[in-house]
Image (spheres, rainbow, N blue to C red):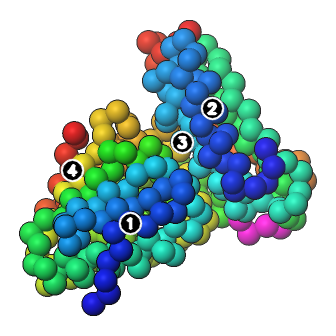
Amino acid sequence: MPCDWRCIDRVREGIALLLGVRPHAAELAGPLAMVCAELLENAVKYGVRDAAPVLITVREEPARVVIDVTNDVAPGSRHLAALRARLGWIAGFAQPGDAYLAAVEAVYEGDDAFAGEGGLGLVRVAHEGGCLIECDDSTAGRVTVRAVRPRAAAERA
Amino acid sequence: MKRLPREVERPPMSVAIAEGAKRVAITGRAVEPEVGTWLCPLIDDIHHAAVAAEHDEVVLDLRHLEHANAALWRCLVYWLRVLRRDEAARYQLRVFAAPTHRWQIIGMSTLKVIGADRLRVEEV
C-alpha cells in the first residue's frame, strides 16, 4: 500500500469484505478490519514519507489470525521508542480492557503521555480487536508491528 | 453565541445537528487523522448551545457511523470532559449505538465509566 492516508480506508474495507466471506471469520471481520486500519494509520503517520510501500499481510491460521504491518522508519526514530514504550505499557495490565480504560482516562484528564503517538489506537487493537501486539525492528530502517488474534474453538476453520 | 451549522460534511463522514443542538448524528466513516481540529471546536459550540438552551438531554446518534478511528474516540472523550467540567451544564448525553457495530458497544462500555451519570448509552 502506498504510504498515503487516503488508501487506508479502502484497504480496511477490502479486508472487512474478504474476511466477511471467509468461513468462520465473519465475526472477526469488523474487529480485524479496525485493527488493520489502526496499524496502517500508525505506519503512515510515523513512517518515512515517500519511502517503500507499507506492507500489510493478513494470515489465517487454524488457531489464530496474524496481521503484520511493515513500514520504513528513520534511524533513531522517537516514534519507534514510543511504540516500544506503549506496547510495554499495555503488557503491564492484566487485561487489555484495563489498559483501554486507563488510556481513555488519561485522554480525559489531558495527561496522556502517548498523545499523538498512536497510543489509543494500539490499545484499541488490544482490547476491541482482542489482539496480542508485538513489534520487530531487527531490520535496520524497517519496523513490523504484528497483531495476533487467537481464535476461539467456534471461530476455527 | 455562534450559529450552529445544520450539517458539516467531511467525506466520508458527516455531522448533522438538529433541534437546537438537541440531536446530533455522526454518520459515515471517521478516518481523518486530525479530526479533532474541527470536531472539538464543533463539540464546544454544540455544548454551549445546549447549555444556553437548558437542554436536559442531547442525543448523539452513532448508529450509522460505520467505522471510527482512535482520533474520533478522543473527540468523544473530549465531549465528556467538557460536559462534566461545566457546572452550568444540565444535560445528559444520550448515545444511540448500533448493536451490529460491535466496536461501538465495546468502546461505549468504557466511555460509560468516564461519563458516569452524564452519559447514557442505548443499543438501538
In what element is the residue under mark 2?
A: helix
Disc 2 to disc 4, C-alpha distance: 29 Å
Chain identity of mark 4:
B
- Disc 1 versus disc 3: nearer the observer: 1
- In percent of the image, x 44 and y 12: which residue is there? A154
- Disc 1 versus disc 2: nearer the observer: 1
| Relative side of A65 to A56, left or right | left
Q: Which amino acid does label 1 sit on?
A: Glu
**Residue A148 x, y percent position in the rendering:** 60, 33
Q: Which residue lies furthest to the front in this view?
A: B6
| Relative side of A10 to B107, left or right | right
Disc 1 to disc 4, C-alpha distance: 23 Å
Q: Residues within 10 Å of mark 4 (few under 14, many from 20)?
A: some
- In percent of the image, x 52 and y 63: which residue is there? B10
**Labels 2 and 4 within one chain:** no
Give the magenta range: A76-80
- Residue B7 — which label? 1
Judging by the rendered image, the residue that carries numbered circle 2 is A15
Q: Which amino acid does label 2 sit on?
A: Ile
- Residue B123 — which label? none
**Labels 1 and 3 within one chain:** no
B62 vs A130, nearest the viewer:
B62
**Residue A70 x, y percent position in the rendering:** 78, 45
Q: Which amino acid does label 3 sit on?
A: Met
Quadrant in the rendering for residue B1? bottom left
- Disc 1 versus disc 4: nearer the observer: 1
Quadrant in the rendering for residue B66? top left
**Residue B6 x, y percent position in the rendering:** 33, 69
- Residue A34 — which label? 3
In what element is the residue under mark 3?
A: helix
